[in-house]
């Protein structure tokens, strides 16, 4: 395959994971990609904080192109930090001093965890108050976003009724759609849209890749990972076990999609399926595993400005490294080893060709 010409925008799609305040890492990644200016972003699939980042970015882009998108993202996360100043869940003083971002030593967080396991949000928050809605409405001009044609975005939520993913395209994006994508069932009441009720999209797609393959023409997909897939340390405490179960649950659908992509790519390489119906995808990954693996679920509720800026810095650095190392691969080949990054349990079980078939 011929390499794309230099000095021409490289078309790409983005897939943004969700994870509460850890979405500030994705803010940093997007900030650096927009600053670089060499990417033509065709579509973005996001879940929870990933979907919110996508919507804020697109609305800012419509208003003021790349700089407008960067300003919009900064303003949104600053509003989140301002809102968090009133939260009783704060790091202990010594944790702030040592720049330890988890809330393990916060008595309020420990009480909150126990409380939400005993009582549902229908009992603890009967008025269904969620200040994030106000922040979204301050940050996004939803009618302008829905009318835009700058890029395609997809926000995933999980139907409580069917257990299936629903993906809202940008013509359907409302504050309700974004709230549904980020609705953790132990914290907030399910969001009702068109007679159905929705929880966090991470249960069925964190993020979903298929909206990009079905609705976009770009062959390159860049995943921004904020939820560690691999943890080498065995969880032993109750909090550690719950945290790891959440990570496994929220990564399961992505791993399945990556296996399917790898399978199709190898069938194409082996000329076992028609290129008339399928196309090879070039997969890319931005991740800061060593830094993110130190953060547990409690830190996803930490919205202090220092922490959000720390995550933003990590994201910018990771995006900068990725651009320097892999930009020339866009449109040519994948820059991530799917087996190593997503299918570690299969690294000793490669796809094997048997006659005209392929088996595992």
Image (tube, helix red, strand yellow):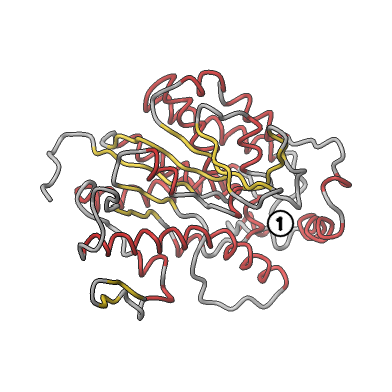
At 49% from the left edge and 38% from the top edge, which residue is drawn?
154
Q: Position of residue 255 (x, y in %)?
A: 46, 62
Q: Is residue 46 left or right of residue 262?
A: right
Quadrant of res 296? bottom right
At 19% from the left edge and 48% from the top edge, which residue is drawn?
328
* Residue situated furthest bottom in the rendering: 348
Q: Residues within 10 Å of mark 1 (few under 14, many from 20)?
A: some
Q: Is residue 49 left or right of residue 198?
A: left
Position above or below: 149 against 123? above
* Quarter containing the C terminus: bottom left
Which residue is more in the foreground, 43 or 273? 273
SS class, disc 1: loop
Q: Position of residue 326 (x, y in %)?
A: 24, 52
Which residue is more in the foreground, 119 or 192? 192
At 61% from the left edge and 36% from the top edge, which residue is drawn?
178
Position above or below: 275 against 240? above
Which residue is more in the foreground, 62 or 74? 62
Q: Is residue 218 left or right of residue 177?
A: left
At 55% from the left edge and 77% from the top edge, which residue is drawn?
233
Position above or below: 130 against 101? above
Q: Position of residue 7 (x, y in %)?
A: 15, 34
Residue at numbered disc 1: 92
Quadrant of res 190? top right
């Amino acid at each position: 395959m011929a390499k794309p010409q230099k000095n021409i925008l490289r078309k790409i799609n983005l897939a943004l994971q969700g994870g509460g305040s850890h979405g500030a890492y994705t803010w940093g990644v997007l900030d650096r990609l927009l600053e670089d200016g060499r990417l033509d972003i065709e579509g973005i699939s996001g879940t929870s904080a990933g979907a919110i980042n996508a919507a804020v970015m697109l609305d800012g882009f419509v208003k003021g192109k790349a700089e407008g998108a960067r300003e919009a993202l900064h303003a949104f996360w600053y509003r989140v930090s301002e809102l968090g100043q009133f939260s009783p869940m704060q790091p202990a003083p010594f944790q702030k001093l040592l720049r330890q971002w988890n809330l393990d030593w916060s008595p309020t967080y420990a009480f909150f965890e126990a409380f939400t396991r005993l009582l549902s949000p229908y009992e603890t928050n009967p008025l269904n108050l969620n200040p994030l809605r106000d922040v979204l409405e301050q940050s996004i001009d939803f009618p302008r976003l829905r009318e835009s044609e700058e890029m395609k975005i997809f926000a995933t939520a999980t139907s409580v009724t069917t257990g299936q993913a629903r993906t809202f395209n940008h013509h359907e994006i409302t504050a309700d759609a974004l709230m549904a994508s980020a609705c953790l069932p132990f914290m907030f009441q399910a969001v009702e849209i068109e007679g159905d009720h929705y929880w966090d999209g991470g249960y069925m797609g964190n993020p979903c890749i298929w909206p990009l393959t079905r609705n976009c023409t770009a062959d390159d997909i860049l995943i921004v990972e904020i939820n560690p897939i691999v943890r080498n340390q065995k969880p032993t405490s109750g909090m550690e076990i719950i945290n790891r179960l959440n990570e496994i649950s929220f990564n399961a659908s992505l791993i399945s999609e990556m296996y399917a992509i790898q399978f199709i790519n190898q069938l194409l390489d082996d000329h076992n399926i028609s290129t008339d119906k399928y196309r090879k995808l070039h997969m890319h990954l931005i991740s800061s595993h060593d830094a993110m693996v130190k953060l547990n679920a409690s830190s996803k509720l930490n919205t202090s400005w220092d922490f959000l800026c720390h995550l933003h810095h990590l994201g910018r650095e990771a995006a900068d490294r990725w651009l320097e190392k892999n930009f020339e691969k866009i449109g040519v080949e994948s820059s991530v080893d799917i087996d190593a990054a997503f299918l570690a349990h299969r690294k000793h079980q490669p796809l094997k060709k048997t006659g005209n078939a392929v088996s595992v």
